[in-house]
Image (spheres, rainbow, N blue to C red):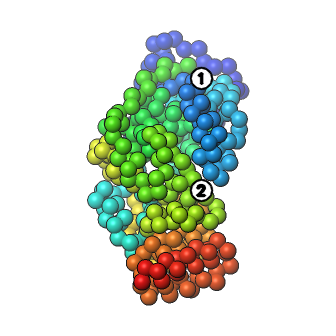
């Protein structure tokens, strides 16, 4: 790809820029993207909110959130020459809300956030964005651009809101009033002077269902998420011991959490994804905690090949499931499985197994 800084930006008439913008949206739909929007590079409001959130330490151990200075909030500093951002949406909901709620309600089953049941979305969406950029190049000639799918310091949700794809709800996820929030985001930074779309308006109103439902009270105020309490952070990003006070609230969630999306009234408009790659693999939508806890490292690596889950590693996988087993109803089968891991080489795993065994004993 050509970086915007490597060339002079195109000079387009107002009519030509509008025509190209319409073509980009049409091509995006042809490539299977559910929504495409355009915005400029001004994220000054989001920058102030991010700096306050970082100052409050709510990013936990995600030190990468504080890296790169202002490149995260100023696209033209990350990719010099950037004039416009093309923001896109790709839906991923693999099953009905009833099926998801059934999985959460069964303490013997392992709950995996529904975005991670299928193939890792990063490469799939990146390929779509690359093909979209190539269509633009075929139309306008060589232009500067870079494609991003959660792969650099990019504020994808504020950009998407400015591009009209939805608003950041009180849980901080992006919501489209016609499609809910079960979707991925991706971006093309480019040096084309494209006319921006109207930003999306907030439609949360007085609703605070997501705040009320959060199992660990991670949404500490409307539009403010304390990652240090969030189950998605604790089971995916957090590298060490999960705070004991938060473990009971994790329930049977072993990778991520979807509660705030499940309860959001706007998700009644969400549609099931047509992407075959997002369908559940390795029966992760119905697997039991005991089945997944029995995976050795080789099995874990084999069964999570091509999955977003693989990046947490086998140690965190066992840590998370140990917590879920500690929250499960007491049984001999659960205690035997935990005892089999009691001498695991990892101190983190041993600690969480010991906690789970104590919970099983107390519950009994």
Q: Which mark is residue 73?
A: none
Can residue 164 be seen here? The reply is yes
Q: Residue at x 48, y 75 (%)?
A: 326
Rendered view: 278 above or below 13: below
Q: Position of residue 308 (x, y in %)?
A: 54, 58
Give SS at disc 2.
Answer: helix
Is residue 237 toward the left or the right of residue 30 in the image? right
Secondary structure, mark 1, is: loop
Which is more toward the observer, 261 or 4?
261
Q: Is residue 277 above or below residue 126?
A: below
Q: Is residue 109 left or right of residue 239?
A: left
Question: Could you say which is closer to the camera, residue 68 or residue 46?
Answer: 46
In the picture, which quadrant includes the N terminus? top right
Tell which tag, 1 or 2, sits nearer the viewer.
2
Q: Earlier in the sequence, mark 1 or mark 2?
A: 1
Position in image of residue 340 (x %, y %): 56, 86
Rendered-image quadrant of the C terminus: bottom left
Where is 80 relative to 294, above or below?
above
* Crowd class of label 1 (few under 14; some 14 to 19; many from 20; radius 10 Å): many
Residue 89 seen anywhere in this rendered image of the structure: no
Residue sitting at 62 percent across and 75 percent down? 351
Query: x, y (%) of residue 39?
Result: 51, 26
Q: Nearer the viewer, residue 161 or 87?
A: 161
Instruction: Specify few, some or many for label 2: CA neighbours under 10 Å numbering under 14, 14-19, or 20 or more.
Output: some
Name the disc covering residue 237, or none.
2
263 displayed left or right of 199: left
Distance from Cα at disc 1 to Cα at disc 2 = 32 Å
At 48% across and 83% down in the image, what residue appears? 361
Q: Which residue is mark 1?
A: 83
């Amino acid at each position: 790809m050509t970086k915007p800084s490597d060339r002079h930006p195109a000079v387009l008439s107002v009519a030509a820029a509008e025509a190209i913008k319409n073509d980009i949206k049409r091509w995006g739909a042809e490539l299977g993207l559910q929504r495409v929007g355009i915005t400029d590079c001004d994220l000054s409001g989001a920058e102030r909110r991010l700096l306050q959130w970082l100052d409050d330490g709510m990013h936990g151990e995600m030190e990468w959130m504080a890296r790169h200075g202002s490149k995260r909030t100023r696209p033209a500093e990350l990719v010099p020459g950037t004039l416009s951002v093309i923001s896109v949406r790709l839906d991923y909901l693999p099953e009905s809300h009833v099926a998801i709620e059934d999985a959460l309600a069964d303490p013997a089953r392992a709950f995996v956030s529904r975005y991670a049941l299928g193939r890792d979305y990063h490469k799939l969406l990146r390929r779509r964005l690359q093909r979209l950029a190539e269509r633009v190049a075929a139309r306008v000639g060589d232009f500067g651009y870079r494609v991003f799918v959660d792969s650099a310091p990019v504020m994808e949700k504020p950009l998407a809101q400015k591009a009209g794809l939805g608003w950041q709800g009180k849980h901080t996820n992006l919501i489209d009033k016609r499609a809910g929030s079960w979707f991925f985001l991706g971006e093309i930074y480019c040096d084309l002077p494209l006319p921006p779309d109207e930003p999306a308006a907030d439609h949360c109103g007085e609703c605070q269902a997501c705040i009320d439902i959060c199992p660990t009270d991670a949404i500490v105020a409307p539009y403010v998420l304390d990652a240090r309490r969030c189950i998605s952070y604790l089971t995916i990003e957090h590298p060490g011991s999960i705070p004991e006070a938060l473990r009971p609230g994790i329930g049977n969630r072993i990778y991520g959490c979807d509660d705030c999306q499940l309860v959001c009234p706007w998700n009644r408009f969400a549609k099931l994804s047509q992407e075959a790659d997002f369908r559940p693999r390795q029966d992760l939508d119905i697997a039991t905690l005991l089945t997944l806890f029995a995976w050795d490292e080789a099995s874990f690596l084999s069964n999570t090949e091509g999955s977003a889950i693989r990046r947490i590693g086998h140690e965190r996988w066992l840590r998370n499931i140990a917590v879920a087993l500690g929250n499960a109803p007491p049984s001999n089968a659960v205690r035997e499985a935990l005892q089999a891991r009691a001498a695991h080489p990892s101190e983190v795993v041993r600690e969480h197994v010991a906690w789970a065994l104590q919970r099983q004993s107390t519950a009994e």
